[in-house]
Amino acid sequence: MMDDWLIEFRIRRTLRRLARQRVAMVRGGIWIIEKAVMTSEVTACDLKTCHLRGWVEPIENALPYGSLPPDGRLPATGPVFDGVGPLYRLTEGGWAVVNREQQWVLISVALAVLALVLH
């Protein structure tokens, strides 16, 4: 079993990757997402943990998804979509975690107290 701090680091890294994804284009009602979070069992668990903590919420469930080959073209043969899954968005709490607002507040309070003590 991984250490707790390592798991927390992985969860927050997944959250930061989710914050970086963006819609590149829309083709026939299909969203083409750049820098999409790759789906795996570990990533799904990370996103469910973020959802449990209130950092993300699903926008849609059971959306079809697939990956493009390295050249970026649609596959000539075979299915375009190879699975279904939810599409998540960050909540205000999730953005606070990404921007590390709690740490900045704690540092600001510590500096203010230090300034009062030294004055």
Image (cartoon, rainbow, N blue to C red):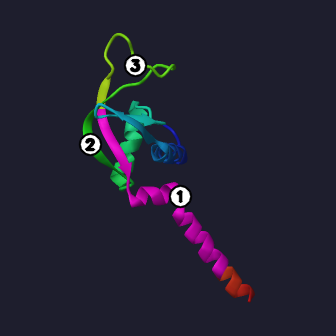
Answer above or below: position of 117 versus 111. Answer: below
Q: Which of marks 1 and 2 precedes in the sequence?
A: 2
Magenta span main SS: helix
Nearer the camera: disc 2 or disc 3: 3
Tell whether label 1 touches label 2 (CB within 8 Å). no
Dot 2: what SS?
Answer: strand
Q: Secondary structure at mark 3?
A: loop
Look at the numbered disc 1 and give the secondary structure of its residue: loop
Q: Are marks 2 and 3 in contact (CB under 8 Å)?
A: no
Segment colored magenta: 85-112
Callout 2 amino acid: Glu
Q: Quadrant of the C terminus?
A: bottom right
Query: Residue at the spot x=54%, y=48% of the render?
Result: 5
Residue 73 position in % (x across, y down): 44, 19
* Residue drawn where x is 68% and y is 87% of the image: 116
Q: Which mark is residue 99?
A: 1
The residue where tag 2 is placed is 60
Q: Which residue is mark 3?
A: 74
* Amino acid type, callout 3: Leu
Residue 30, horizontal then vertical, whole percent? 31, 33
Give yes or no for residue 92 being in the magenta stretch: yes
Residue at the extreme bottom: 119
Distance from disc 1 to disc 3, alpha carbons, whole Å, reads 35 Å
How far apart are labels 2 and 3 at the CA level?
A: 24 Å
Q: Residue furthest right?
A: 118
Q: Does residue 40 lie above or below 56 as drawn?
A: above
Label 1 or label 3, whichever lies nearer to me, is 3
**Residue drawn at the location 31% of the way across and 16% of the way down:** 79
Horizontal arrangement in the rendering, residue 43 relative to residue 99 (left or right): left
Within-10-Å neighbours for mark 2: few <14, some 14–19, many 20+: few
Amino acid beneath label 1: Asn
